[in-house]
Image (cartoon, rainbow, N blue to C red):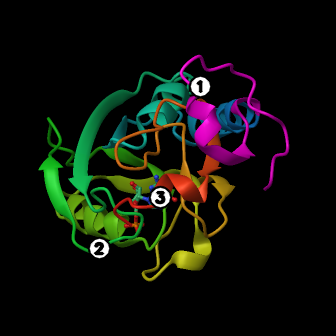
Amino acid sequence: MHDESAPNTTWSGGLSDDISRVILSEETIQRRVAELGAQIAADYQGRDLLVVGVLSGSFLFIADLVRQINLPLALDFISVSSYGDRTRSSGVVRMLKDLNQPIAGRDVLLVEDIIDTGLTLSYLIDNLRTRQPASLAVATLLDKKEARVVKIDTAYIGFECPNEFVVGYGLDYAGRYRNLPYIGVLRPEVYAGGDK
Ligand code: 5GP
């Protein structure tokens, strides 16, 4: 899934200078998000869809995705921490913000930015299942299959992702780069001296 096209946005602050390779261009992402939205709309026709975004990494994906789902859906957010400033999963998941509403009897679609080890989602799925939704499905923009340590059933996958640390389109490194409109890999110098 290597996308050779150069970023089509000019950054006055030089944000793109820290990116060594663009993996998914803005256009490629938007095209796929539109496809996923149409597929989800078709699958959830006539159902009580509650989209649950996993903050913070999925904020751009959710914003774009829900605008491509032509259904009267409801939206909520949940936030867990699993990474801090590190680039590897610690396996420790902590609930930072819970849902604002009960989900019993509702059709819940959990929206993630990226599934790496799967530990974060596995925790969330177990937690949400105890609340007895009518159904619980997962949509992820990126899937790093190679890094998986627990099995996760994913109904909707945007792209398979190489086993590298990526940033942009919601994904951060040490809190930065979330506002890049595309997904890329950071130059190694950016990590030098940082918390890896
Ligand atoms: P998992 O628990 O599946 O290992 O990790 C899931 C979370 O780790 C994601 O929601 C994301 O916040 C973070 N993560 C995993 N891989 C990457 C990556 O390549 N880049 C960034 N920025 N975050 C990642």
- Cα separation, mark 1 vs mark 2, equals 34 Å
- Cα separation, mark 3 vs mark 1, equals 36 Å
Extent of the magenta region: 1-27
Tag 2 residue: 90
Find residue 1 and report its image quarter.
Answer: bottom right
Horizontal side of residue 86 vs 6, given as left or right: left
Give above or below for 11 relative to 165. above
Amino acid found under the numbered disc labelled 2: Ser
| Front-most of residues 34 and 86 | 86
For label 3, the SS is: helix
Residue in the picture at 63% in, 36% down:
17
Task: Examine the structure image and report whether residue 50 is included in the region drawn in magenta.
Answer: no
Amino acid found under the numbered disc labelled 3: Tyr
Which of discs 2 and 3 lies nearer the camera? The answer is 3
Q: Earlier in the sequence, mark 1 or mark 2?
A: 1
Q: Earlier in the sequence, mark 3 or mark 1?
A: 1
| Front-most of residues 91 and 18 | 18
For label 1, the SS is: loop
| Front-most of residues 44 and 90 | 90
Q: Position of residue 54 (x, y in %)?
A: 34, 46
Tag 1 residue: 68
Q: Position of residue 34 (x, y in %)?
A: 67, 31
Does the rendering let one see residue 46?
no
Give above or below for 181 relative to 67. below
Tag 3 residue: 191
Does the rendering let one see residue 56?
yes
Horizontal side of residue 84 vs 71, given as left or right: left
Which of discs 3 and 1 lies nearer the camera? The answer is 3
| Dot 1 beta carbon under 8 Å from ligand 1 | no
Q: Position of residue 31 (x, y in %)?
A: 74, 32
The residue carrying pointer 3 sits among few (fewer than 14), some (14 to 19) or many (20 or more) residues within 10 Å by Cα, namely few
